[in-house]
Image: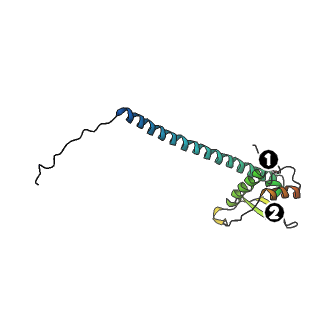
Amino acid sequence: MVHSNNHKCRKKKLYVDKSKMKTTNFKLLNTKLWTMVKKNNENVEQRKLEEATNRRLQNLEHVLKTKVAEGEDSVDMMNLLVSPRSFHETVENFFDYSFLVKDGKASIKLDPKTGLPLCALEEQPEDQLKKFQTVVVLGPQDHKRIVDYWRIQQTTLLRED
């Protein structure tokens, strides 16, 4: 290998302003901490929502079990799930009930005399669950009509909040 004298290798001394470096590192650290705190807060909020849903599911299952213990094999769906005071609660109640149906713990039946929907407890083994999906479209006006038509004064499903 031949070196030419035409190219002189110079070593440049790298100058680092340590005061800026500390500031930059502090900003980086601050950004990382902020990201960690934000992610933790999101996780806490997610856990709170899951815990609230689990409490509502347990409450719903308890109400159905109580009705069965009282001798009823099913409960009128509208009186159970529709909250006259809140469209939001009604949507949550239908959402929660759908989990019980999906897990084979509850079902929706039609009253043979009236044709109206009923909620009932079920105990289906996991391997015998029939998977299907139904979409319920319910808007605020529909909620009001149901409350008025069924004359719902108070829901069977009382909430803690």
Q: Quadrant of residue 68?
A: bottom right
Give the mark nearest the N terminus, 1 or 2: 2
Q: Quadrant of residue 13?
A: top left
Of residues 70 and 99, the one drawn nearer to the viewer in this rendering: 99
- For badge 2, the amino acid type reads Pro
Residue at point 35%, 33% (across, down)? 18
* Residue 36 placement, left or right of 84: left
Q: Is residue 33 visible?
A: yes
From this view, report whether residue 45 is shown above or below residue 133: above
Residue at point 39%, 35% (across, down)? 20
Q: Marks 1 and 2, how far apart in space?
A: 20 Å
Quarter in which the C terminus is drawn:
top right
- For badge 1, the amino acid type reads Leu
Residue at point 73%, 53% (across, down)? 92
Q: Position of residue 114 (x, y in %)?
A: 87, 66
| Pointer 2 residue | 117
| Pointer 1 residue | 158
Q: Residues within 10 Å of mark 1 (few under 14, many from 20)?
A: some
Q: Secondary structure at mark 1?
A: loop
Q: Position of residue 26 (x, y in %)?
A: 44, 35
Q: Secondary structure at mark 2?
A: strand
Q: Position of residue 2 (x, y in %)?
A: 10, 54
Q: Is residue 72 visible?
A: no
Residue at point 84%, 64% (across, down)? 116
Which color scheme did the rendering employ for the protein? rainbow
Answer yes or no: do the residues labelled 1 and 2 have beta carbons within 8 Å? no
Of residues 126 and 134, the one drawn nearer to the viewer in this rendering: 134
